[in-house]
Amino acid sequence: YLNGTKYMLACRHMFIADNCMDEDGDDGDLINDQWGRDPSGSDAEPFGYVKEEYQRYDGTLINNGASNLPIKYDIADESGGVIGRVTDDGLDYLCSNDITVHKRGRTTGATTGTVTGIREDDYCDGITTKHQAGMVRATNLQKQGDSGGPLYYWEYDSDNTDNLYLVSMPTRKVTSDEYAWGSSADIMY
């Protein structure tokens, strides 16, 4: 939510050449290609538009006013919805206890792993004034096309709908091992 309006969270680098660049991604189109349409083709329909962008988190807020599709709290193929975020203390707990976390990526699909690093920084070409702060590293596989897919903790509840808590929004991979890496949901909040 921003000023009482619900938006979809997506990665910023979808709308610019490189997240380290200062160019403006506002008003960029998010193309709905779930039916396999070519986003550059004439039949492409915008799903929404960038309302706000946050270079420090490689994040954007998408207004889906171009579509009648609702913005939901659901994660594809999960029985529950996102009801919150993992806090800073929760990240410590996940990392220290090898707790399973889940990720949905467009390329890799559903994966599981563990959180192996928290509060990490990623700098743009050594420029200390431009960086992503509060990065979370997890052993879930990350490949091109997965950017912005959620990393989340799943809390099973036999009496109610399962509870999902957002851990981070992976926007890149750790080059050496293809692990998911992105800003924590808590620091973005």
Image: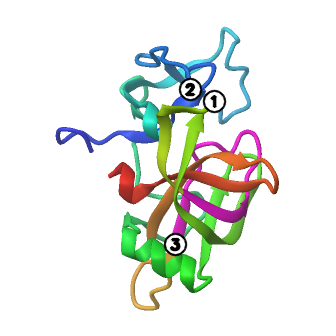
Query: Which residue in the structure is indicated by mark 3?
Result: 153
**In front of the other: label 2 or label 3?**
2
Q: Which residue is mark 2?
A: 20
Which span is picked out in magenta?
136-153
Q: Is residue 164 above or below residue 62?
A: below
Q: CA distance from mark 2 to mark 3?
A: 29 Å
Whether pointer 1 and pointer 3 mark residues with C-beta atoms closer than 8 Å, the reply is no
Q: Quick one: label 2 or label 1, which is nearer the N terminus?
A: 2
Tell me if I can see residue 183 in this picture.
Answer: yes
Left or right: residue 18 versus residue 57 is right
Crowd around label 2: few <14 · some 14–19 · many ≥20 (10 Å): some
Residue picked out by circle 1: 125
Is 132 colored magenta in this rendering? no
Q: Nearer the viewer, residue 44 or 104?
A: 104
Tell me if residue 102 comes above or below residue 73 in the rendering: below
Q: Callout 2, which amino acid?
A: Cys
**Residue 150 x, y percent position in the rendering:** 55, 55
Q: Amino acid at mark 3?
A: Tyr
- Marks 1 and 3, how far apart in space? 32 Å
Among the 4 quarters of the image, the one containing residue 15 = top right
- Tell me: residue 91, above or below residue 45: below
Q: Residue furthest right?
A: 176
Residue found at x 73% / y 20%: 38
The residue nearer to you, when weighing 102 against 125, is: 125
Apparent side of residue 15 relative to residue 180 in the rendered image (left or right): left
Expressed as whole percent of the image width and height from the top left, the position of residue 176 reads 82, 52
Q: Earlier in the sequence, mark 2 or mark 3?
A: 2
Indicate the secondary structure of the residue bearing disc 3.
strand
